[in-house]
Amino acid sequence: MKKALLLKTTLALVFASPLLASAESSLVGGNGTANARLNLQVVIPGFIALKVGTGAILSNTNTVDLVNFTLTDAQAAADGTVGATSGGVVPVQLISNIGSVNFSSAGAALTDGTDSIPLSRITVASAGTLAHPAFGAAATTVTPTSGRIVNRSSDWTFSYNHQGATAPVGAGSYQTQVTYTAVAP
């Protein structure tokens, strides 16, 4: 019985020994130099971070900012560009470590019941290194700022091209939501 247990234990150690990790070692006699090597590895996952509006980049925030245009009586009856009454300058940032990123925006017309204002009447000026992607158009490619790193930011200023004299719309609160998408090509 003892021989069988000893034999099983010996066989288990023989088969397990290749699985045990062992470091490189060097034994040198006399005045020689001993060297041993060690492999190091760092694994960095790929990521894309996009921030549109207030909040911190590299975190998940569920707050959706609002750009609001409240027209005066005189503006409602005329054609012209109207600046936002609140939220008109939106800070944006795109960071990625995967190389080029495809960037797009999509949204429907602004609606109030059955009345609508085309999204094309909203214009966006960009001050910085991240251009605003055209609403509903094909994605634009954002290229790396260095190596495979994309680190771009801007302040987007929104305006509304009101056509109160040439194409008036009924009184109301017209709304839509725009979704910005950054994705690896």
Image (spheres, grey):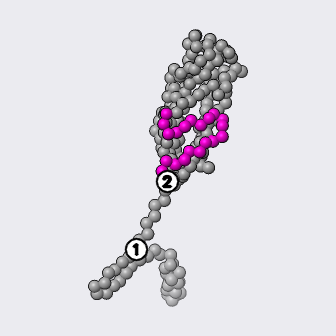
> Judging from the image, what secondary structure is the residue with disc 2 in?
loop
Taking the magenta stretch, the answer to whether it contains residue 79 is no
Whether residues under marks 1 and 2 lie with C-beta atoms below 8 angstroms apart, the answer is: no
Instruction: Identify residue type, mark 1.
Output: Arg
Q: Is residue 93 visible?
A: no
The correct choice, above or below, for 4 with respect to 123 in the image is below
Residue with the mark numbered 1: 37
- Magenta range is 127-146
**Residue located at (61% from left, 30% from top):** 177
Front one among 118 and 39: 118
**116 vs 60: above or below:** above
Depth check, front residue: 84 or 115? 84
Q: Nearer the viewer, mark 1 or mark 2?
A: 2
Farthest-out residue, left: 31
Q: What residue is drawn where x is 63% and y is 42%?
A: 139
Sequence-wise first label, 1 or 2: 1
Q: CA distance from mark 1 to mark 2?
A: 30 Å
Image vertical order of residue 17 relative to residue 108, above or below: below
Whole-percent x and y of residue 72? 56, 13
Please, what secondary structure does the residue beneath circle 1 have? loop
Vertical comparison of 54 with 71: above or below = below
Instruction: Give residue 160's position: percent from left, percent from top.
Output: 59, 23
- Could you tell me what secondary structure mostly forms the magenta stretch? loop
Pick whichever, 94 or 41, lies toward us: 94
The residue under label 2 is 147
Decide whether residue 128 is among the magenta residues.
yes
Instruction: Give the left or right position of residue 3, taking residue 117 as reference.
Output: left
Q: Position of residue 172 (x, y in %)?
A: 63, 16
